[in-house]
Amino acid sequence: MPLEKNDFCALVNKTYDKYKISWKATNSVLANELLLREILKTVPHVKGRLLDIGCGEKPYLDIFSPHTVSYTGIEIPQTFHKKDAVDIFANAHQLPFKKDSFDTVLCLEILEHVKQPLEVLKEIHRVLKPGCVLVLSAPQNYWLHNDPEDLYRFSQQGLIELVREQTGFTINYIHSLGGTREFFIDFVCKYILIKINTGILGKIIPATLKKFIVAFPQIVYLKLFKNTDVNILFSLGNIIVAVK
């Protein structure tokens, strides 16, 4: 899910060879943890020269870099993230690279923010080498997050239409990020967040405590339920691995 502005620490931490989402870095622990689990499954598909579109602070760099020969991150100049990790400032509608330049492209939680998603996918197709891989994720049922714009939501059918039918990729697989249970937990926690950020509560509760209050039900849920609901009607999002 969207990588929210980070005032505390890195979104993804590694402890004892296990990657976890930091509750101090996001109000969406559950959504980001579900996405992280799926991202880890894509590692065997990643290789060669990698392009990370909308890289932010490169939260997945440590996961992917051992499997690549180079890791290039691009961002828009007006990004809300820290800019230290960005290699090139560019617009995804016009990627500043030659045809067949990359072996892997990441486009994670970016498609909802671009004005012309199909145009971006065609640019990705152009810069990927034949037979090489796109790893793409996008939200389906998720709250509005303006960083800087939030324009679209994508069902599985919608992503298949864009990625395969209109752009020409072959889809290896598409997985949902959670289902009805996860949607309900995320919804409740977002409602709590809104309430504690408004009125007198917003003024008296410290920022770190607010994050803990919102994160705690999500952390408990992740501990109690190892297997996620697979009802795609209420999926928080979807992830695709596709080949040019």
Image: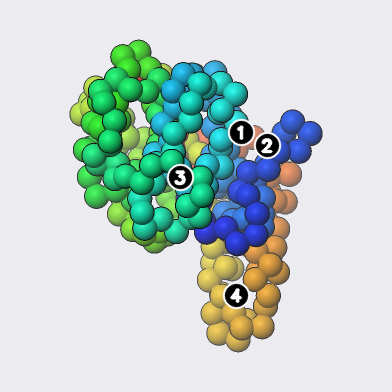
Crowding at dot 3, Cα within 10 Å, few <14 / some 14-19 / many 20+, comes out as many
Question: What residue is pinned by disc 3?
Answer: 86
Q: Earlier in the sequence, mark 3 or mark 1?
A: 1
Question: What residue is pinned by disc 2?
Answer: 19
Quadrant of the rendered image containing residue 126: top left
- Where residue 238 sits in the image (x, y, percent)? 44, 37
Task: From the image, state whether disc 4 or disc 3 is nearer to you.
Answer: 3
| Residue in front for this viewpoint, 112 or 227 | 112
Q: Residue at horizontal 28%, vertical 36%?
A: 95
User: In the rendered image of this protein, does residue 235 appear above or below residue 219?
Assistant: above
- Where residue 54 sits in the image (x, y, percent)? 41, 44
Q: What number is the disc on residue 196?
A: 4
Task: From the image, state whether disc 4 or disc 2 is nearer to you.
Answer: 2
Q: What number is the disc on residue 52?
A: none
Q: Residue at horizontal 70%, vertical 63%?
A: 212
Three-letter residue code for mark 2: Tyr
Quadrant of the rendered image containing residue 191: bottom right
Kindly give the residue lying farthest to the right in the view shown: 16
Task: From the image, state whether disc 2 or disc 1 is nearer to you.
Answer: 1
Q: Residue at horizontal 29%, vertical 30%?
A: 97
